[in-house]
Amino acid sequence: MSGHSKFANIKHKKEKNDAAKGKIFTKIGRELAVAVKEGGGPDPNNNSRLRDVIAKAKSNNMPNDTIDRNIKKAAGEGAADNFEHITYEGYGPGGTAIIVKTLTDNKNRTASNVRNAFTKGSGNVGTPGCVSFMFDEKGQIIVDKEECEIDADDLMMLALDAGAEDFAEEEESYEIVTAPEDFSEVRLKLEEEGIPMMNAEVTMIPQTWVELTDEADIRNIQKTLDLLEEDDDVQDVYYNWNE
């Protein structure tokens, strides 16, 4: 593990998310719709992908009735738009690597918006695969120490027994890492044991981190990330800037 704690970033993101719940709910609504269509139907007991998105929705404080309404809408014949996954890769200032995962019903609009976000931050969109080799796709579960009642050793054994690859103790949190294909099972096992998860998702973890010291570079990458975050088509943004 890099030993780089994502806890502060997640807390920061959650605070920003709370100020823009509507936008976050729109994005998660799309994920729920796609999970219903591609994961095997509206019953989370038979659809592990949907189960994971529901857990993500709840960790973002999405009300249960909103979750249910999105699932029912997606289950209706032709009721949900046909979204497709498109991933963009590119470079930000100082050689930083950025991956943008989108769910869109309009490829031209999304491509234009993503390109615009990179350009305004003095970066550029590259070809598929140009930076993804610098990241590892992993399941990542973050547990807030203050919320967790069992001690570190017990949590580590529980996670490893469930199939996790790695466990790290940070200052304020525990980080559990899994192979992508084992993520659902590990997350479900922790949920069954009553472990409160602050964040649980399959993510892209950088192999190395880039430090930015130039103020203009920092302003520019922040501009790119803010523009991407504001875009309804953008679901996830991964980068190797060490904030």
Image (cartoon, rainbow, N blue to C red):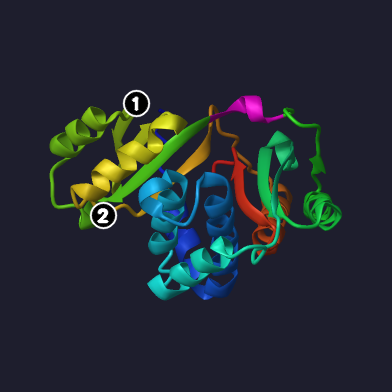
Query: Left or right of 45: which side holds 192?
Result: left
> In the depicted view, which residue is nearer to us: 123 or 108?
108
Residue 140 location, x and y as percent?
A: 41, 40
Residue occupying image coordinates x 42% and y 49%: 52
**Relative height, residue 45 to residue 134 (above, below):** below
Look at the numbered disc 2 and give the secondary structure of its residue.
Answer: loop
**Relative height, residue 22 to residue 187 (above, below):** below
Residue placed furthest toward the front: 77
Around disc 2, counting alpha carbons within 10 Å, would you say few (fewer than 14), some (14 to 19), or many (20 or more)? some
| Three-letter amino acid code at the position of disc 1 | Glu
Residue occupying image coordinates x 51% and y 67%: 72
Q: In which quarter of the image is the N terminus?
A: top left
Query: Left or right of 169: which side holds 24?
Result: right
Whether residue 16 is visible, yes or no, is no
Residue 97 location, x and y as percent?
A: 67, 36
**Relative height, residue 99 to residue 37 (above, below):** above
Query: Left or right of 131: which side holds 178?
Result: left
Residue 146 location, x and y as percent?
A: 22, 56
Q: What is the span of residues highlighted in magenta in the rendered image?
A: 131-136
Whether residue 11 is visible, yes or no, is yes
Look at the numbered disc 1 and give the secondary structure of its residue.
Answer: loop
| Three-letter amino acid code at the position of disc 2 | Pro
> In the depicted view, which residue is nearer to us: 105 or 100?
105
Query: On residue 93, which mark appears?
Result: none
Q: Which of marks 1 and 2 is nearer the N terminus?
A: 1
> Which residue position holds label 2?
196
> Which residue position holds label 1?
165
The magenta stretch spans residue 133: yes
The magenta stretch spans residue 188: no
